């Protein structure tokens, strides 16, 4: 007999519909899976066989062939276990074929017949369309996020067989509340002093400018960066779904309310490999940290300690907002539009006020060279952060809380979108004169900077974009970018090289 | 052939032997011809005391020297010196600096590029940290410039930071020639970025070293170099130094030799001035101005050729106040905003103007005042 059961597999962050066809016929007892299964699916044979027998069903001693259609693509993952088991039971006449009509199955089986969750249920359920999906209880949130039809939750194959034999009803579960709960995010009010760094955060959030914080250890770079997501507006429904799909595919726990509604904040350790940052892996093409930071913030602490190759892998995604990962047999496109925030010390000893560095010149240069010029160029804001003075640190002066700043950020973003359709960081060079005109005083200031070799041509455009954002953030009319906006932008683009040009003095 | 070799060739070879010190070399050369000393060192003859005692204490040294004797043939060492234009001046030579000859730790020979006779003029040493601040470097340039202009030879170490700045200042005055004492071979400029400065000093003045050509700049050689530097000056000025800097070693060597030590005072909060301020507390004379030092030398210090014209527009209002605040210590933009109760944009404007006019310089987020001597030399 033949059975045909819908299920799905995952490539990158996308689900792909797979029909599990099971054929049971006379012949020497065998159990084969065809249709380009990979190692993890071939192992399903042993799991499915044990799970069926543990559920009190006889294993058909016939020739069983499983085909995974379409057979063109290589498939991976253990999520097909449940569909294969159901297919075998139907094809062997142990379950009524009519009972599985309009149902799709996703889940991994244990040898005892229990059902286990797999990563990526949300995108997989998403591609199944208008059917009822049967998934493990643990995948409830992910399934509900994307389901069109009903979501059926089961804990074991035994329970499922009981339901399909009409001996018992589907177990009722409270559906998760798909809304948005307020999330505690670290508040800017906790940051004392650090005026320019706070301003930089606000500007980064408003214009989506990639930012680099340079300063000695203990100056609060990490503390500042973790406050950035709180300044970004909540994700709209469409973005939220996109992010949720990626997080589900990566097996990252979703928030209890299902959708990822807050811009995510990812802070991979500096020992992270290129694959873990960019995504990939030899078979499954898992989303990397940059995709998990999609629509949110990717924070790279100790930037200079990252492997140079891993950092250079960020350049293409930074440009395109997505990453194409290709392997011999498969390739996937993953979303990766993130706001990059990085932190580093000015030199290996940590630096500090002029004259306090203890590094030899060669050592300091080696450290700085680890971050390639092209990557440094992507940072619109390069902010020098210093340890706050004791008075400032202990001051009881109330600092502006995140909520207030976020409101200004939101207004500035709307202003930019209404004016030019994109955020300021994405303004093309030729459009600057139209959307970010500068007055004569500002132009003179920029000219002086360039004449004195403190500003390059590339830096010029970046300063103008940042100045545009600064003008958008300040109260009052801001059609034209003024000299104060430009001066502030220049200060937030400090040279990352500490004063090592003594020789130039003479 | 060896008969035609000058005595200096043997000394040039011996000076580069493994773990050769000036006292060992002095012992070897005492009372015998350098050729004979070379023969003894490579084991051709029995080692007389005190060398025999040294060989006994370091059993591997005799073998190392035998090996060195084969590698450092006097003919070859001499050729290298000739090719690089390096003189070897032995302690007995009339060209040998007399102030050094009288020194208890006098090197038996000096390797020299340039003209040793310039050391007959008045000499002031300028030393300081390699990791200087912009202000410190500017001070060194100014002192170097003024001393040279007053006809005083500036003696320094050609290192990064203060030393190099002092030499640049001295060269910029286009008057008295500079002198340098280094801790490595004269054919390998170190640090490399000072290679051009190195050539200019050799060209106009003199560079000396107690190590033969090819000697690498090992860390232990610099403190040794400092004693020669100290012995060569009449007076030593320390511009900036950490609490434990190499320039403090020079200051100590100078004090031992009765050479007066001057220190340039700095902010008590600046690490770069911790060492110099300590010197002041311990009794060094403060050098606020090159004139202070010139007076101590008993020199006429009339400011004849000095232009007091500063082309930079004088800052006014907030600008002047900000500049003044940065004069005492480098400040960040945040500190300035707080101190003057300005908005970030307001401070940014002030700093932008001061930077444009050449008053301030951004050094990794800290603003330092630029001395008007920027551009000299």
Image: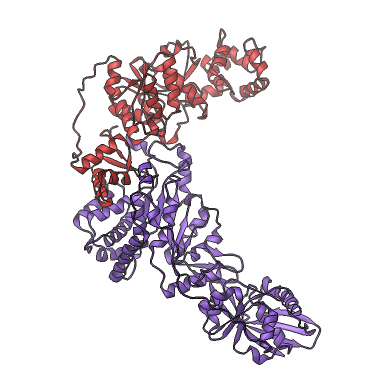
Chain colours: A purple, B red
Residue B329's place in the image compared with B99, above or below, is below
Q: In which quarter of the image is the N terminus of chain B?
A: top right
Please tell me which residue lies in front, B89 or B147: B147
Residue farthest toward the top in the current orientation of the protein: B31
Residue B169, how many percent across, how many down?
31, 29
User: Along the horizontal axis of the image, is A143 left or right of A420?
Assistant: right
Residue farthest toward the right in the current orientation of the protein: A28
User: Along the horizontal axis of the image, is A296 left or right of A441?
Assistant: right
User: Along the horizontal axis of the image, is A304 left or right of A465?
Assistant: right
Residue A316, how many percent across, how many down?
46, 63
User: Along the horizontal axis of the image, is B366 left or right of A87?
Assistant: left
Q: Quadrant of the C terminus of chain B?
A: top left
Please tell me which residue lies in front, A164 or A286: A164
Residue A237's place in the image compared with A433, above or below, is below
Residue A11, how many percent across, how many down?
57, 73
Residue A378 appears in the figure: no
Q: Which residue is drawn at 33% across and 16% down?
A: B122
Q: Residue at x 81, y 84 (%)?
A: A28
């Amino acid at each position: 007999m033949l059975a045909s059961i819908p299920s799905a597999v995952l490539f990158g962050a996308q689900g792909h519909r797979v029909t599990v066809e099971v054929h049971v016929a006379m012949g020497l007892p065998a159990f084969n899976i065809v249709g380009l299964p990979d190692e993890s699916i071939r192992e399903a044979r042993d799991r499915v066989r044990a799970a069926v027998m543990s559920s009190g069903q006889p294993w058909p001693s016939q020739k069983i062939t499983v085909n995974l259609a379409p057979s063109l693509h290589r498939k991976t993952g253990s999520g097909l276990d449940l569909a294969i088991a159901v297919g075998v039971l139907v094809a062997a006449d142990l379950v009524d074929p009519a009972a599985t009509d309009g149902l799709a199955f996703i889940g991994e089986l244990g040898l005892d017949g229990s059902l286990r969750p797999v990563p990526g249920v949300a995108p997989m359920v998403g591609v199944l369309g208008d059917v009822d999906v049967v998934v493990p209880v643990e995948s409830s949130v992910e399934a509900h996020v994307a389901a069109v039809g009903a979501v059926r939750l089961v804990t074991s194959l035994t329970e499922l067989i009981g339901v399909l034999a009409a001996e018992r009803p589907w177990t009722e579960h409270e559906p998760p509340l798909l809304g948005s709960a307020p999330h505690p995010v670290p508040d800017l009010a906790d940051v004392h002093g650090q005026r320019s760094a706070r301003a930089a955060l606000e500007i980064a959030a408003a214009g989506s400018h990639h930012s680099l914080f340079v300063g000695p250890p203990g100056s609060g770079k990490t503390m500042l960066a973790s406050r950035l997501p709180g300044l970004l507006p909540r994700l709209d429904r469409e973005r939220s779904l996109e992010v949720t799909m990626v997080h589900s595919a990566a097996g990252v726990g979703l928030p209890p309310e299902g959708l990822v509604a807050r811009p995510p904040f990812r802070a991979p350790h500096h020992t992270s490999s290129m694959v873990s940052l960019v995504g990939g892996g030899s078979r499954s093409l898992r989303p990397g940290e940059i995709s998990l930071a999609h629509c949110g913030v990717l924070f790279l602490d100790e930037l200079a300690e990252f492997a140079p190759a891993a950092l250079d892998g960020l350049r293409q995604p930074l440009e395109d907002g997505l990453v194409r990962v290709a392997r011999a047999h498969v390739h996937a496109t993953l979303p990766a539009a993130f706001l990059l925030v990085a932190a580093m010390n000015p030199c290996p000893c940590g630096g500090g006020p002029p004259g306090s560095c203890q590094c030899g010149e060669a050592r300091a240069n080696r450290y700085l060279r680890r971050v390639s010029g092209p990557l440094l160029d992507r940072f619109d804001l390069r902010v020098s952060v210093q340890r706050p003075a004791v008075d400032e640190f202990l001051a009881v002066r109330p600092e502006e809380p995140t909520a207030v700043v976020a409101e200004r950020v939101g207004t500035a973003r709307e202003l930019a979108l209404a004016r030019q359709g994109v955020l300021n960081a994405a303004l093309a060079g030729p459009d600057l004169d139209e959307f970010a005109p500068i007055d004569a005083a500002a132009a003179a200031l920029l000219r002086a900077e360039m004449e004195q070799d403190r500003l390059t041509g590339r830096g010029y455009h970046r300063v103008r974009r940042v100045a545009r954002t600064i003008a958008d953030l300040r109260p009052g009319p801001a059609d034209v970018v003024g000299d104060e906006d430009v001066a502030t932008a220049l200060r937030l683009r400090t040279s990352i090289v500490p004063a090592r040009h003594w020789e130039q003095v003479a | 052939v060896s008969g035609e070799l000058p005595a200096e060739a043997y000394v040039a070879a011996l000076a580069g032997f493994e773990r050769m010190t000036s006292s060992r070399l002095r012992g070897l050369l005492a009372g015998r011809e350098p050729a004979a000393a070379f023969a003894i060192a490579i084991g051709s003859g029995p080692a007389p005391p005190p060398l025999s005692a040294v060989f006994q204490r370091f059993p591997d040294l005799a073998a190392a020297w035998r090996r060195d004797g084969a590698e450092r043939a006097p003919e070859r060492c001499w050729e290298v010196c000739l090719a690089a234009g390096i003189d070897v001046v032995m302690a007995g030579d009339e060209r040998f600096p007399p102030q050094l000859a009288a020194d208890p730790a006098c090197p038996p020979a000096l390797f020299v590029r340039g003209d040793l006779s310039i050391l007959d003029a008045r000499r002031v040493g300028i030393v300081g940290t390699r990791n200087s601040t912009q202000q410190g470097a500017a001070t060194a340039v100014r002192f170097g410039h003024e001393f040279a202009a007053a006809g005083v030879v500036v003696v320094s170490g050609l290192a990064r930071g203060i030393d190099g700045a002092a030499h640049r200042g001295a060269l910029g005055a286009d008057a008295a020639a500079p002198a340098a004492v280094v801790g490595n071979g004269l054919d390998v400029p170190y640090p490399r970025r000072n290679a051009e400065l190195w050539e200019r000093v050799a060209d106009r003045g003199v560079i000396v070293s107690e190590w033969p050509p090819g000697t690498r700049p090992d860390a232990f050689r610099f403190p040794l170099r400092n004693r020669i530097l100290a012995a060569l000056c009449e007076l030593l000025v320390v511009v900036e130094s950490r609490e434990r800097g190499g320039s403090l070693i020079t200051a100590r060597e100078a004090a031992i030799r009765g050479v007066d030590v001057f220190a340039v005072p700095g902010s008590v909060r600046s690490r770069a001035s911790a060492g110099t301020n300590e010197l002041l507390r311990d009794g060094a004379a403060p050098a606020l101005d090159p004139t202070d030092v010139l007076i101590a030398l008993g020199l006429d210090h009339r400011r004849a050729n000095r232009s007091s014209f500063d082309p930079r527009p004088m800052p006014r209002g907030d600008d002047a106040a900000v500049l003044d605040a940065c004069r005492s210590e480098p400040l960040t933009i945040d500190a300035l905003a707080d101190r003057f109760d300005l908005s970030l944009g307001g401070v940014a404007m002030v700093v932008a103007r001061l930077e444009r006019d050449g008053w301030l310089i951004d050094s990794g987020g800290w603003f330092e005042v630029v001395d008007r001597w920027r551009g000299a030399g």
